[in-house]
Image (cartoon, helix red, strand yellow):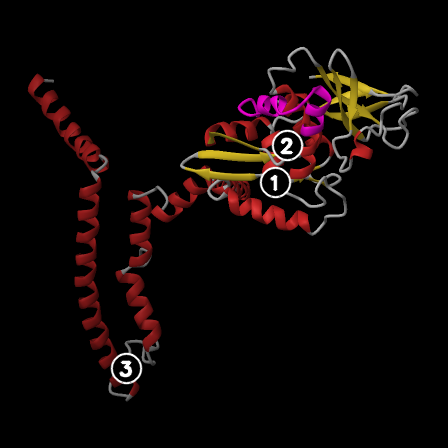
Amino acid sequence: MKPIVIIGIAFALLVPLMGVVFIYEPESEEEQKIEIQRQIEKQKVIDKANEAYYERLSQHREKALEGTLTTKLGHEGPTLEEELEKQRNRLFPNPTLEEELEKQRNRLFPNPTLEEELEKNRVSLFSQPKEMDELLKELEENLKKIKQQNKKYENLEDAIEERKSLFQNDLDFTTPENSLFLPEIAIVQQTVSVTLYDSKNNAYNWSIPLSSYEDQLERGTNFQRITLSMPDGSSNLVGDYRPYVGTSFTQVIDDVWNNSANESEFLYEIWFMTSRHTVYSEDIGEFPRVALDTLARGGGDCEDLTILLADMIRSSSHTKSWKVSLVYFDANNPENPVSVNHLALGVDTGKNYYVIESTAKTVDTLDKWTGVDLYAWYLDI
């Protein structure tokens, strides 16, 4: 066979194949959309022709019903509905236009709708919406606490007056002057000013930056517990109050010493100011307070008042050699404890030893533990 004939035959076979490839070559998305639009326009033309056909068919059918026409078989033709359905199936053997368009859309756009995709992503991002709501709620609560904390010191005088009113409703004791005498505390231009009075009505004034006052309050948030061994071998869990004792009164406490005749009078004045400027309330709070916080609030429980006394003593330059300790014991059974429920202050000056009852409101009860063989735990400060 001649080469030119072979080439001709090969070309004749290749062209249809190329046509097939061309026919089935994937079209671009834009071309597919144009093709669908063309099909729609074509369908409109067909629908219009079909409508005209239906109208003519209807006219013939009406005539047939009137007896003017008969079928070739000599009997009445099909009903109008049957004829219309037959013609529709002949003209449109494929599914309806809506079905065809939906089929083409699914072929062109196999991905889900935008709404479905967004919902899918939302579920993916927030697979646990309940936990997210709880987290948002917790964040809102924390933000509220922070805002309240920021406002805490905006008007300390109002807080003191409120606390004074609260405590004076519960006065059931005898102070050195038979009345509660709150310290004078004010905040002016980010400075906290404090004034205390001793038994001779000497005034002791000093001031600290508000930031230092806030730092002391922050120290009061680090509450820890320790375990004490009881005589029967059991254990008792108590608070460790040593970290709450600072030196908050260094600016004035030496003046108190100078106005005292001896160490006993100095300790009396320290107790007097604590008793005069605070009230005792059993378990007034769940956590202990630092010294200035107890003064600002106007009172506290045995732990708070003992911390206040210890802070005053530790603030003096004349007491550096003194041994000061927190004394834990059972106030109901001081010699044979069954629990640990009270705190007092132990002071060893090198000459004398004192156990000061920080909650005492009279001199008679100030040294109530003197001469008592206490079974106690002493934690040095």
| Residue 319 visible at all | yes
Q: State the CA–CA distance, disc 2 to disc 1.
A: 10 Å
**Quadrant of the frame with the C terminus:** top right
Q: What's drawn in magenta, residue-wise?
A: 249-269
Q: Is residue 247 visible?
A: no
Q: Quadrant of the N terminus?
A: top left
Q: Secondary structure at mark 3?
A: loop
Asked where in the image residue 285 lies, by quadrant, the reply is: top right
Please check the rendered image and state whether residue 257 is part of the magenta-colored stretch, yes or no.
yes
Q: Is residue 296 magenta?
A: no
Mark 2 vs mark 3: in front: 2
Q: Which residue is mark 1?
A: 297
Q: Quadrant of residue 125?
A: top left
Query: Closer to the N terminus: mark 3 or mark 1?
Result: 3
Q: Amino acid at mark 1?
A: Arg
Mark 3: amino acid: Thr
Along the viewing direction, whichever of 24 and 140 lies nearer the viewer:
140
Residue 23 appears at what percent x and percent y?
A: 20, 38
At 63% from the left and 19% from the top, the residue drawn is: 314
Distance between the Cα atoms at labels 2 and 3?
113 Å
Q: Is residue 280 left or right of residue 50?
A: right
Residue 365: x %, y % from top left = 81, 34
Residues marked 2 and 1 touching at CB (< 8 Å) = yes
Q: Which residue position holds label 2?
A: 289
